[in-house]
Image: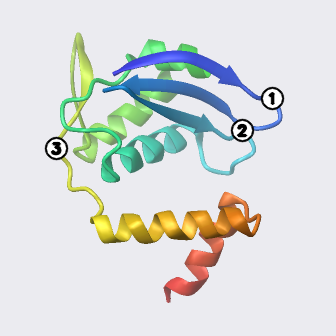
């Protein structure tokens, strides 16, 4: 897995394309979010692993590469990677690339339901935040 070109939309998020295995994946940093940037990185990478978009052994960009693509301090990316390692999502070692570890993915029926929900949310013009809030409201 290597980091590709960065795209930047000044009104919205900072993003970095990460490609591996022929798939194009995106990390999006929302500057307006109350969630710290390192947590946004951690959550997105962990989410990609859980839904099967990143697989056991996939190589992540170096801390410096990802920080440069996202226009962030390397310490921010390093903190995200450290948390991913603590959670057992990635393996790290000095001088070696961070790699995805084998992690249990989300069951296929749940992924299908999520896909359907996302499609319906798009059809009615809901934002991602609205869709998540609606799901949270129904969770109890």
Q: Earlier in the sequence, mark 1 or mark 2?
A: 1
Q: What label does residue 102 carry, if any?
A: 3
Q: Cα distance, mark 3 to mark 1?
A: 36 Å
Tell me if mark 3 has few (under 14), some (14-19) or many (20+) residues whose alpha carbon lies within 10 angstroms of its own: some
The image shows residue 30, relative to residue 122, as above or below, that is: above
Disc 2 and disc 3 in contact, CB within 8 angstroms: no
Disc 1 and disc 2 in contact, CB within 8 angstroms: no
- The answer to which image quadrant residue 62 occupies is top left
Using the rendered image of the protein, determine whether residue 129 is visible from the camera's viewpoint: yes
Disc 3 and disc 1 in contact, CB within 8 angstroms: no
- The answer to which image quadrant residue 97 occupies is top left
Q: Position of residue 14 (x, y in %)?
A: 67, 30
Disc 1 on helix, strand or loop?
loop
List the single residue furthest toward the bottom. Answer: 140
Is 4 left or right of 11, judged from the image as shown? left
Residue tagged by mark 2? 31
| Residue occupying the point 25% across, 29% down | 58
Is 127 left or right of 57, judged from the image as shown? right
Disc 3 on helix, strand or loop?
loop
| Residue occupying the point 49% across, 38% down | 41
Q: Cα distance, mark 2 to mark 3?
A: 31 Å
Is 83 left or right of 24, judged from the image as shown? left
| Residue occupying the point 76% across, 38% down | 12
Using the rendered image of the protein, determine whether residue 71 is visible from the camera's viewpoint: no
Q: Earlier in the sequence, mark 3 or mark 1?
A: 1
Q: Position of residue 78 (x, y in %)?
A: 41, 26
Q: What label does residue 10 carry, if any?
A: 1
């Amino acid at each position: 897995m290597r980091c590709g070109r960065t795209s930047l939309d000044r009104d919205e998020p900072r993003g970095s394309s990460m490609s591996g295995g022929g798939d194009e994946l995106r990390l999006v940093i929302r500057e307006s979010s109350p969630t710290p940037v390192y947590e946004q990185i951690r959550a997105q990478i962990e989410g990609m692993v859980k839904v099967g978009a990143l697989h056991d052994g996939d190589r992540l960009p170096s801390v410096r590469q990802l920080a440069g693509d996202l226009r962030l301090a390397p310490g921010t990316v390093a903190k995200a990677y450290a948390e991913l390692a603590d959670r057992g999502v990635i393996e790290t070692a000095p001088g070696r690339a961070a790699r995805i570890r084998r992690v249990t993915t989300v069951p296929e029926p749940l992924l299908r339901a999520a896909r359907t929900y996302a499609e319906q949310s798009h059809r009615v013009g809901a934002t991602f935040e609205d869709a998540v809030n609606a799901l949270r409201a129904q969770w109890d």
